[in-house]
Image (cartoon, grey):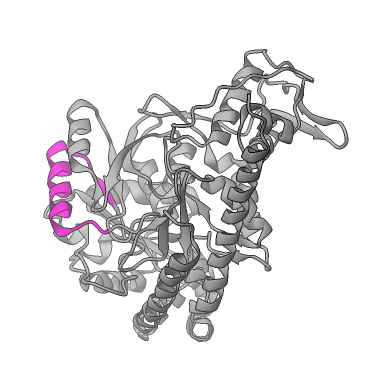
Amino acid sequence: MAEVSFVLDRDSEEPLYRQLIRQIKLQIESGQLPAGTRLPASRELAEQIDISRISVVNAYAELRAEGYLSAHAGRGTFVSRMNNSGSYAPDAPRVRTHATQEMPALSADYSLRDMMRLSARKDVINFSHGSPPPEFYPIQQLRDAINYVLERDGSAALGYERLEGFPPLRAAVRDYVSGLGILCSAESVLITGGAQQGLDLIVQSLLNEGDTLITTNPTYLGLLDTARARRVQVHAIPQDDDGIRLDLLENYLYDHKAKLIYVMPSFHNPTGTVMPLHRRRQLINLAREHRVPIVEDAVYHELRFEGESQPTLKSLDEGDTVIHLSAFTKMLLPGLRIGYVIAGSSYMERLIRIKQAADISTSGLNQRAMHWLMQRGVLAAQLARNNRELKRRYYAALAAAERYLPQGTTWNKPEGGLYLWVCLPKSGPTAAELFMNAVKHQVTFAIGSVFFTNNAGSHNLRINFSLQRPELIEEGFKRIGIAWQELTQDNQDYMEKKPIL
């Protein structure tokens, strides 16, 4: 067995297990740990470098998933041999960011996929996904809509639809967003396969490989996935309680060239922040001055259960600076995959061309069903009903957080959206360590660090309170609290048993 030496920075924002992963990779790639080398057992290494055993277990698991290590029952953990391409992790491409760091390709992160699989188990209280709960879906109304469309349109509903979208639906979206203060023509509306496809189309149409996209830190994980897939550089600007820091954004734009700014001004995912009116105006003016278009992701804009609504960026835009992106996936039916982009003619032609290459057209049947639901008032009625229930679940989550989360934990208090953004005490286990133990207690959440580009957020977690009824919210938070107590007790027991040198 090899003698290993790792130096961990305990004051760093980077989680200890991430530091351990990075150092093991470095020693493998440099040849200090050659193929076939046996590594210490997790308990032994934890004692040797004075960290919790679960941190070592997490590090070993991720390194096995990426192909750096292999485990053999009864024999131990070994450094793997390289594949024919000379790489240990052929499926994990990396993209260089403007922050002089390499941003890991989370879309190829097998540990993240494992977490999503664990969350999907029926016996788990799941707070991790970014969707509304199934009981919010208007199943009977959708059945009526599909039956009506098939009876009315027959086979026409099952063929290829126009690239831009079903014309009556485009007109319905135009009328719908007019209620949000957005004045546009139906020709300015492009129907997409959800907001995620709309975002991908925008990125492909406006940026080339290597161009820079600006967003917040933290930001929507789907944006990072898209940027990695399209090999676009991401520069992340820190945000405060009012959204993206405009002073830092302005400094960056004066010194660097950027092609696009992505923001989620209302009920930001994951933090739940809402950008106030004055900052919305300032952001538009700054972007216009530097001639950088803004993508406004408004998928949560109408999920408000308290306070006063802020105007959309697009409604404040006097030129063609803002591209408005939204969908009916959070408000109504995620699986129907109906979203839309509202953009000026200077962008629309490129967006349509990219969409033609992507999927030819969004499902005609789904578009016609959505049009029926909008025309019959189902969308408005369901949104009002869902927001009332969101408020009930939100207050249940606040009460449960107060009751069960460890002392020193803080969380946001949003006026809408789906998420609590939680910050655990920095002196205790990380969110990743807590997740692994929480799974044993059949509860899951989203680990905060995946929403950052710089390994920050190690003690943050995102809890989608909408996914569970109040009684299960109570039980889920209780289980998270128990998982935390177990970890801190294990660490305390270890420190008490550790010999004094």
Image x and y of residue 361, in percent: 46, 59
Q: Is residue 224 above or below residue 185?
A: above
Q: Is residue 496 above or below residue 322?
A: above
Q: Is residue 198 visible?
A: yes
Q: Quadrant of residue 119?
A: bottom right
Q: Is residue 399 above or below residue 425?
A: below
Which stretch did the figure color magenta?
274-295
**281 is within the stretch colored magenta:** yes
Q: Nearer the viewer, residue 454 or 76?
A: 76
Q: In which quadrant will I find the N terminus?
A: top right
Image x and y of residue 437, in percent: 64, 52
Q: Nearer the viewer, residue 340 or 316?
A: 316
The residue lying furthest to the top in this view is: 31
The residue at 17%/38% (across/down) is 247
Q: Is residue 361 visible?
A: no
Image x and y of residue 341, in percent: 33, 58
Q: In which quadrant will I find the C terminus?
A: top right
The residue at 58%/46% (across/down) is 433
The residue at 37%/43% (across/down) is 203
Q: Is residue 354 above or below residue 304?
A: above
The residue lying furthest to the front in this view is: 500
Image x and y of residue 472, in percent: 56, 74
Q: Nearer the viewer, residue 60 or 190?
A: 60
Main SS of the magenta part reads helix
In this image, 230 relative to 414: left or right? right
Q: Quadrant of residue 440?
A: bottom right
In this image, 263 relative to 75: left or right? left
